[in-house]
Image (cartoon, rainbow, N blue to C red):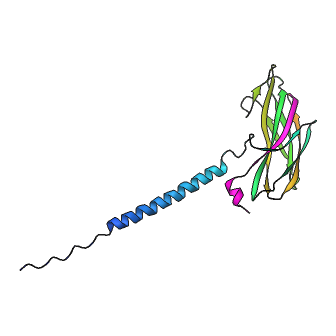
Amino acid sequence: MQQAQPAPRKSYKGILAGVGCGCLSLLSLCCGTGGWLAYADNRELANPDGARVVEVPLAGSNYSVPVGFDGHGYEFQQVWLDVHGVAADGRFRLQGTLSCGTDGYDRPYDLEVGPTTRGYAAGPTPGSFEAVVQLGDDYLRSGEHHTCTGTVDAGPGTITSATVYVTERQRPSDFFAN
């Protein structure tokens, strides 16, 4: 008489492989989402095409623009100069200072303006041009209001007209920060 064979043991390899693949998929999803959020948080922070919250024509070499934020969390406000000028011997340079907020710290800048400058376009007469340059930025918490002041001087070259304006940009992490 033959003895009955014991039933073969069930293998749990398939279940373990399924759980392992599920955990790896979830981990990949979390890493991918985190990577996308980091990318979205830092892409094109300085963009002159953003919403202009204030715009002031430059009169002389001094400017004063009010900035403020009443949204949620924090936001960057960038100060831009839309300048039309005439280069001297093919060169145009902007020097000046920017001071925003209550720190009273003057941030100096010295910028060469040329064909590689963002928004640069040759003007209708030889040596004339227009360009958009960032003078600086300010990081504001909701409810903050103050004034950015500064100076703009050209040399070599001449400024024919200019406008100082402020754009705003809030990153996803700025919205959630409090």
Quarter of the image where one finds residue 172: bottom right
User: Quick check: 79 above or below 155?
Assistant: below
Percent of width and height locating residue 27: 50, 60
Percent of width and height locating residue 80: 80, 41
| Residue most extreme to the left | 1
Horizontal side, residue 154 vs residue 39: left or right: right
Q: Residue at x 66, y 49 (%)?
A: 42
User: Quick check: 126 above or below 94?
Assistant: above
Q: Is residue 76 on the magenta stretch?
A: no
Percent of width and height locating residue 147: 89, 50
User: Quick check: 30 above or below 98?
Assistant: below
Of 34 and 114, nearer the camera is 34
Quadrant of image for the N terminus: bottom left
Q: Is residue 162 on the magenta stretch?
A: yes
Horizontal side, residue 62 vs residue 125: left or right: right
The count of marks equals 0
Q: Residue at x 80, y 29 (%)?
A: 130
User: Quick check: 81 above or below 30?
Assistant: above
| Residue most extreme to the right | 60
Stretch of the chain drawn in magenta:
158-178
